[in-house]
Amino acid sequence: METEKFLSDFDYLLRENNQYAVRFYIIFMMNNCITAERINIIEDKLKQINYGDYYVDMGAAWLLAEVLVKDYASGLKLLEKIDFPKFVHNKALQKARESFRISQEQKQYLKTLKK
């Protein structure tokens, strides 16, 4: 199934009161949308999420950390544009800093962004 069609057809999952459905959608984005062409989709969807459930928050943090690792500049822009809950924000920074795929300088800078 084409990614954009899936995202469109299952967009209602983001509004579900089911943390597992929302997390599924987030993880799908993490596996299929971290590209320069689709970063705006990720931004839009992350703004729609109702945060507060553990699995939703962890999924969003994981997605954000992967964006930081795969496209550092785009990840920083997401951190600036979206006011994530403190847990999501800090957990994403932590997970990105634990990665071997970003430089020590980037890790040091991410440490300064902690809420």
Image (cartoon, rainbow, N blue to C red):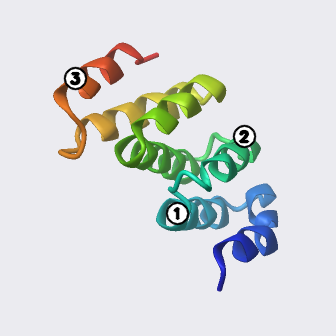
Label 1 secondary element: helix
Residue 101 image point, x, y percent: 23, 46
Q: Nearer the viewer, mark 2 or mark 3?
A: 3
Three-letter amino acid code at the position of disc 3 = Glu
- Extreme residue toward the bottom, this view: 1
Q: CA distance from mark 2 to mark 1?
A: 15 Å
Lower sequence index among marks 2 and 3 = 2
Lower sequence index among marks 2 and 1 = 1
Are the residues flagged by discs 2 and 1 in contact, CB closer than 8 Å? no
Q: CA distance from mark 1 to mark 3?
A: 28 Å
Camera-side residue: 41 or 92? 41
In the picture provided, is 18 more to the left or to the right than 39?
Answer: right
Residue 34 image point, x, y percent: 50, 56
Camera-side residue: 11 or 3? 3
Q: Nearer the viewer, mark 1 or mark 3?
A: 3
Q: Residues within 10 Å of mark 3 (few under 14, many from 20)?
A: few
Residue, disc 2: 47
Q: CA distance from mark 2 to mark 3?
A: 28 Å
Label 2 secondary element: helix
Identify the residue at horizontal 73%, vertical 46% (top origin). 44
Identify the residue at horizontal 17%, vertical 28% (top origin). 104
Residue 20, image quadrant = bottom right
Q: Residues within 10 Å of mark 2 (few under 14, many from 20)?
A: some
Are the residues flagged by discs 1 and 3 in contact, CB closer than 8 Å? no
Residue, disc 1: 27
Residue 2 image point, x, y percent: 66, 80
> How many labels, in total?
3
Vertical order, 16 against 43 (above or below): below
Residue, disc 3: 105
Viewer can see residue 28: yes
